[in-house]
Image (tube, rainbow, N blue to C red):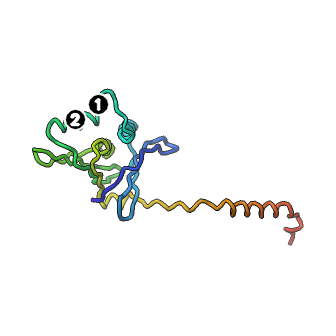
């Protein structure tokens, strides 16, 4: 398993579909984007921003129930990608031992962000769906850009139709 960092929750345009963006912490530093539902996106965004609600939200409730039963969420795994559907596991530990519970990745991530536990992904999923973001080139040099514009203006000012005759 490879450790990931939850980088952002975004809205993919033009479909306005929420997507969660994860990035590999070491190695190739691949990025993994998973489309999720609106409520799950809101739950993750609330947790990332530290928004406190007057009453427990569903993910908070699940953490509270696990705690009352003597379990803590130790880590989450994104385990599989099958027919465009991602699968995840919650790894709970407590007095009763270790328990693994299948979950949707969006729910697993909403829980992981709340408790601050690690997020892992299988190598196979990253090999199939992960991608290395292209480095953004350095911003253009303003002086060089201005020189190119001046050169183009000079060309336009001095060009004549005769210059294009054979």
Q: Give SS at disc 1.
A: loop
User: With 41 as the anchor, is 150 left or right in this view?
Assistant: right
Answer few, some or many: residues within 10 Å of disc 2's Cα (few below 14, many 20 plus, some between 14 and 19): some
The residue at the point 48 percent across, 45 percent down is 12
Residue 63's image quarter? top left
Residue 39's image quarter? top left
Q: Position of residue 9 (x, y in %)?
A: 42, 44
- Badges 1 and 2: C-beta atoms under 8 Å apart? yes
Q: Quadrant of the N terminus?
A: bottom left
Q: How many marks?
A: 2
Answer few, some or many: residues within 10 Å of disc 1's Cα (few below 14, many 20 plus, some between 14 and 19): few
- The residue wearing badge 2 is 64
For marks 1 and 2 on the same chain, the one whose residue lies earlier in the sequence: 1
The residue at the point 38 percent across, 49 percent down is 34
Q: Residue furthest bottom?
A: 166
The residue at the point 14 percent across, 45 percent down is 94
Q: Residue furthest top?
A: 54
Q: Residue furthest front?
A: 143
Q: Give SS at disc 2.
A: helix
- The residue wearing badge 1 is 56
Q: Position of residue 92 (x, y in %)?
A: 19, 46
Up the image or down, 44 lies above or below 55; here it is below
Up the image or down, 110 lies above or below 165; here it is above
Q: Quadrant of the C terminus?
A: bottom right
Q: Position of residue 96 (x, y in %)?
A: 10, 44
Which dot marks residue 136? none
The residue at the point 67 percent across, 59 percent down is 142
Q: CA distance from mark 1 to mark 2?
A: 9 Å
């Amino acid at each position: 398993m490879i450790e990931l960092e939850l980088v952002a929750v975004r809205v993919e345009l033009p479909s306005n579909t929420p997507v969660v963006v994860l990035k590999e912490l070491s190695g190739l530093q691949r990025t993994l984007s998973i489309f999720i539902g609106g409520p799950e996106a809101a739950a993750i965004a609330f947790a990332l921003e530290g928004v406190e609600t007057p009453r427990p939200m569903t993910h908070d409730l699940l953490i509270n129930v696990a705690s009352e039963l003597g379990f803590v969420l130790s880590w989450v795994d994104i385990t599989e990608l099958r027919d465009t559907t991602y699968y995840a596991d919650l790894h709970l530990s407590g007095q009763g031992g270790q328990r693994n519970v299948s979950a949707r990745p969006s729910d697993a991530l909403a829980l992981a962000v709340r408790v601050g536990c690690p997020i892992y992904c299988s190598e196979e999923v990253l090999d199939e769906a992960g991608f290395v973001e292209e480095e953004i080139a350095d911003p253009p040099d303003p002086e060089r850009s201005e020189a190119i514009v001046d050169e183009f203006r000079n060309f336009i000012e001095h060009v004549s139709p005769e210059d294009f005759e054979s």
